[in-house]
Image: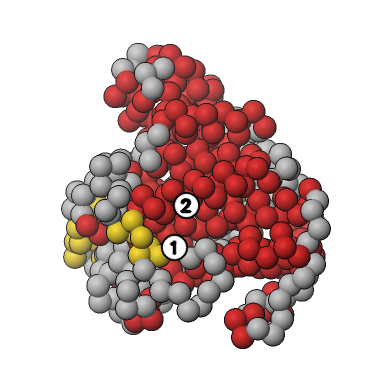
Amino acid sequence: MKKISKYIFLFAAAIAVTSCDDYLDITPVGRVIPETQEQFRAVLTTGYSKYPEHKSLTTLRTDELTLNEFSEDLNIYKDIFIWKDGNPDRITRDFQYQDLYNVIFYTNVVINEASKKVAASEERNQLIGEAYALRAMAYFDLVNLFGKPYNTATAGTDKAVPLALEIDLEQAFVPQSVEVIYNQIISDTQEAEKLINLNTQTKGLNYRFSKVALYSFESRVYLQQQQWQKSLDAANKALAINKDLVDLKATSVFATKYDSKESILALEDGYINRLKGASYASPELIAAYNRTTDLRFPLYFLASGSRFRIQKGGNDDQKCTFRTSELYLTKAETQVQLNNIADAKSTVLAFVKNRYTPTGYVDLEIAINAMNATDLTNFILEERQREFAVEGHRWFDLRRTSQKQIVHTINGTDYTLIKNDPRYTIIYPANARLNNPNL
């Protein structure tokens, strides 16, 4: 508990170092602008603190949850759950389009101003590098929420989101293509690589980017683009810094915890408490696990009558954006795609050895060694579903792979997201469309 309290205190204290309202919210009218290293750090810390909890909302759109029809919060989430994006109930939670641009605004202040006003130092480089990385991550989430899934053949014409790289409230925010946004993401990560000089962040400050977090992010970006070799290379660079896995045979603890040996970037909560109280694990999610041999099942789920509550998420000590499990599964998937089947099997086995009982692992070892490339790919994707349940990965994984049909049921009525449904791309929120006629 002391460690958890320390984490919460450090994060809250960092946010409160100088309330960024003193610097940014009034900057557009030209009153106060940050001048010192400490002030620019406070600006960026506010950007981190404002990173939105959109992953919970994407989880609602997947095959991971079913809603509690008797929850008082049902109407907040129902229209997201049934993919009713065009004319949702007025109390439906919006996807945090504006919030992501607010984060970008804070990063732009650091990127554009800190190098002019703060003397050169390793600390300044680290700060600006983090700002580039955080801006890239915000754009990655924006393009994967509101832009079509990346397709090399059509990315140049597929509509995505506006690009804002300067502190200019008068500019016209016109949507750019998916390709333009991805190019900017990659450009920002390349700038971040030149500047970030900390391999890791200390526990309690690991909501900030480090080299291992940046490499993990790059691996995720390239995976989404199906640039297999680049994704593998980035994953290997991250694993060279941290390759530790939580062994659930030794200790039944959430690998998502900020002080877990797997933790790389502890920024986001993929399953917030309010949604936790309004939902259960879907039958499809429960069916994905072997309840006898998979050590994650009793850790992740708790029986509630005929249904299962999800025990992951909802606490500050479980904020998790990147962790080593993702690196192992990304590495295995890219190795299969690059036809390194034997290496992929070794990578998968190194991972699952930490997630199953000894008996379960023996059976899996036999099964995995007998798999062809297609079966191995499917197994890796199924392991991603099991490992990252309600962490916010599933929607992006479905977009980049099968875009499968999903059926959600409320009060006996079925609602269907058909295979390759256009609703795999979320429309801009109504308030964003109202405020920007270019959308």
Of marks 2 and 1, which one's residue comes earlier in the chain? 1
Residue 88 sits above or below residue 417 on the image: below
Q: Which residue is mark 2?
A: 184
- Residues tagged 2 and 1 counted as in contact (Cβ below 8 A): yes
Image quadrant in which the N terminus is located: bottom right
Q: Secondary structure at mark 2?
A: helix
Q: Percent x, y for residue 237? A: 60, 31
| Amino acid residing under circle 2 | Gln
User: Which quarter of the figure is the C terminus placed in?
Assistant: bottom left
* Residue 71 drawn at (x, y percent): 40, 72
Circle 1 packing at 10 Å, graded few (<14), some (14-19), many (20+), is: some
Given the image, on which type of amino acid does mark 1 rest? Answer: Leu
**x and y percent of residue 347 in the render?**
50, 22
Up-down: is 271 above or below 437? above
Using the rendered image of the protein, determine whether residue 57 is visible from the camera's viewpoint.
Answer: no
Residue under the point 64% across and 39% down: 212
Of residues 63 and 207, the one drawn nearer to the viewer in this rendering: 207
- Residue at 74%, 57% (x, y): give it: 7
Left or right, 128 with respect to 62, comes to right
Q: Is residue 83 visible?
A: yes
Q: Is residue 305 above or below residue 388?
A: below
Check disc 1 and report the residue beneath it: 163
- Left or right of 220? Residue 65 is left
- Tell me residue 80's x, y (percent): 33, 67
**Image quadrant in which you'd find residue 383:** top left
- In the image, what residue occupies the spot 80% across and 67% down? 36
> Which residue is rendered at x = 63% and y = 63% of the image?
112
Numbered disc 1: secondary structure: loop
